[in-house]
Amino acid sequence: MQVTFKDVTLSYDGKRDILKHLNFVIQEGSLVCLLGPSGGGKSTTLNLISGLLAPTGGHIFFDDADVTKKDALGRKVGMVFQNYALYPHLTVLKNIEFPLKMAKMSKADRTKRAKELAALVHVEDQLDKKPGELSGGQQQRVAIARALAKEPSILLLDEPLSNLDARLRIEMREEIRRIQRETGVTTVFVTHDQDEAMHISDQIMVLHDGHIQQFSTPKKLYASPDNLFVAQFIGEPVINSIPATALNHDLAGIVPDSILTQAQTAGIRPEALTLPQRALDPLVTLHGKVLEFDQFGRESTANIDYNGYQLISTEMSQLAHDTKELDFTLEKKGFFLFDADGKRIFGGDTPMVLVGDQSAQKDPAAAPTESGGDTHAE
Amino acid sequence: MKKVASILRYTILTLGALIMILPFFWMLSTSLKTQPETVQIPPVWIPKQLQWGNYVEAFKAAPFARYFVNSVIVTGVTTIGQLFTSILAAFAFSKLRFWGKNILFLIFLGTMMIPGEMLIIPNFVTLSNMHLVNTYGALILPWLASFFTVFTLRQTFNSVSDQTYFAAKIDGASDWRFLWHILVPMSKSTITAVTVLQVIGSWNAFMWPLIVTNDENMRTLPVGLQAFTTDAGTNFALLMAASTFVIIPMVVVYIFLQKYIIAGISNSGLKG
Ligand SMILES: Nc1ncnc2c1ncn2[C@@H]1O[C@H](COP(=O)(O)OP(=O)(O)O)[C@@H](O)[C@H]1O
Ligand SMILES: [Mg+2]
């Protein structure tokens, strides 16, 4: 089911707008993550899709049908909650059967269907147990099976993995991806964990402050963040962000003045700083002092002082341990400039127009697309 | 040191248990005494000859069969009715959204501070205006709602997360279905506890049935026990024999459901 939000606004108290004029389209059959810091409105958005909440303004469409006024039942959604919300007094089988029983399916049919679902989520040998006797991961599987029981138009999951320990979390997110692929159900997944979102989604919607910061593929989100917030939220270790003025001297004559004067913040991914001999597509060479260098196995982190600002690089494993000062390369890929509003004005998928670059022609087709327009590229 | 503490604890608990059981023992013992033994000084703990005949005599002294039927009807209807209204109200206060919910709850909470004795006269006047004195209506009607029960159940319902409520909604359960198929079964132990407390309370009620009935046929068991107190004094042996068979059903109920009562009271955050 394709889900469309048209100018949706939500306020709980009639004073403060939690969501401000949301517009987006979730494609049929895709797995979309709602990502953002706590309090950003992710659950609120999910509840609007489910029909548990009605918007203060705007319209919600499932395919072409306006479902704004329909409740959760009428929208035929399936939902998985953070605490699983299983019925503790019912067995696993009865839990999965419950929505089918409510839909008045015959006993034989619903048992058959519940068993199929239990097999899909790998809990077929736990059918007679009560939820309390299952591990967190197993409870989560049962909750997913229950949500899928009535073949929902859309599957909604609100931070389903946050109650699990780290190892199980990774296992379950792969499971959710597998189950989504096997069933083909359109899925919306809420998380505040960027790593989780990057690994399982077809598309990620970054929500913050009641606005969609960016809605695109994980790849694009990382390589081409629309704004400083997204650049800082996505990526581990976090992107280096320093005042653009610190780079003014080194970038003069390379990045056009018109851009440099607008730029307020520079964002540099830790892997965009390399040693000159390893550089792939260098923008400029910088000079700095090594403050700290740690190597653990194949990974390394170098902490470099550049014009009084600290930069982290993860690409300097070749560095000799006693290096005090060095020249290092700033790669084009992973370097961004943001203006005073935090909007990206240089780097990413904006064509790089460099000073003295004759071939550079502004190509309108390659300009940054409106969020949500691009399709999945994996 | 640990051993001393443990001995001390057991001694105190044993003493407590003995004190609790003493009146029951005294009741049983007196019920089997002869008339003179009941008032003898020093007191007789175990009667010389057990007077089983007291029970037969006590049962014949008043229409106890009728009283028993009355007590069962009043207790049964009161308990079921009160439970039903309380479950609905507690659900509304716990999970539904409606205008004035919090204020209404506070007002009801305030009524819990009014002593029951103060309600006797207004209730009596109301019921006699309704011509219900000397009917089951008078015995049952005032007890069909109890905010204490609503409050206790609301606490338990609140411990069931809203997510569970939403999950059930999404699964297609109406509020009614959710209440009876999910919420009530999930709150089984508290519901059993308030039921038992209510059964015992109704069964033992004395003041109210005494006031609203003067017809022999409408009396309940506790009121019926008055038959043994006359102007000439009280026949303790017979009174205790009758008391014994009046409380036996409650003792049985308690013994079988003890586990739930204790769990329910400790769950609800109410003590004593
Ligand atoms: N039921 C509610 N009533 C009032 N405010 C709420 C309610 N639920 C959430 N909020 C507020 O809405 C904002 C967004 O919340 P939420 O959607 O839960 O964020 P997230 O899921 O991204 O953490 C928060 O500021 C939160 O305090
Ligand atoms: Mg949330």
Image: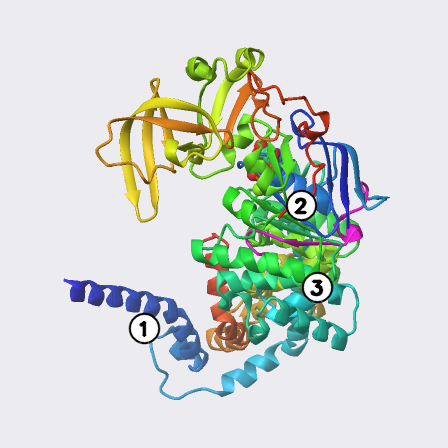
- Whether tag 3 and tag 2 are in contact, CB under 8 A, the answer is no
Tell me the crowding category of disc 1: few under 14, some 14 to 19, or many 20 or more residues within 10 angstroms, Cα based: few
* Separation (CA) of disc 1 from disc 3: 77 Å
Amino acid type for the residue under numbered disc 3: Ala
Residue with the mark numbered 2: A376
Closer-to-camera residue (A123/A366): A366
Where is residue B118 shown, x and y percent of the image? Answer: 60, 44
User: For the magenta stretch, what is the residue range?
Assistant: A67-87
Q: Report the side of B161 relative to A14 (left or right).
A: left
Residue with the mark numbered 1: B41
Eye-nearest disc, 1 or 3: 3
Residue A269 in sight here:
yes
Amino acid type for the residue under numbered disc 2: His
Residue with the mark numbered 3: A149
Vertical placement of residue A153 versus A357, above or below:
below
Residue B139 in sight here:
no
* Separation (CA) of disc 2 from disc 1: 98 Å
Q: Main secondary structure of the magenta part?
A: loop
Q: Report the side of A315 relative to A116 (left or right).
A: left
Q: Report the side of B89 relative to A74 (left or right).
A: left
Tell me the crowding category of disc 2: few under 14, some 14 to 19, or many 20 or more residues within 10 angstroms, Cα based: some
Closer-to-camera residue (A327/B25): A327
Amino acid type for the residue under numbered disc 1: Ile
Quadrant assignment for ligand 2? top right
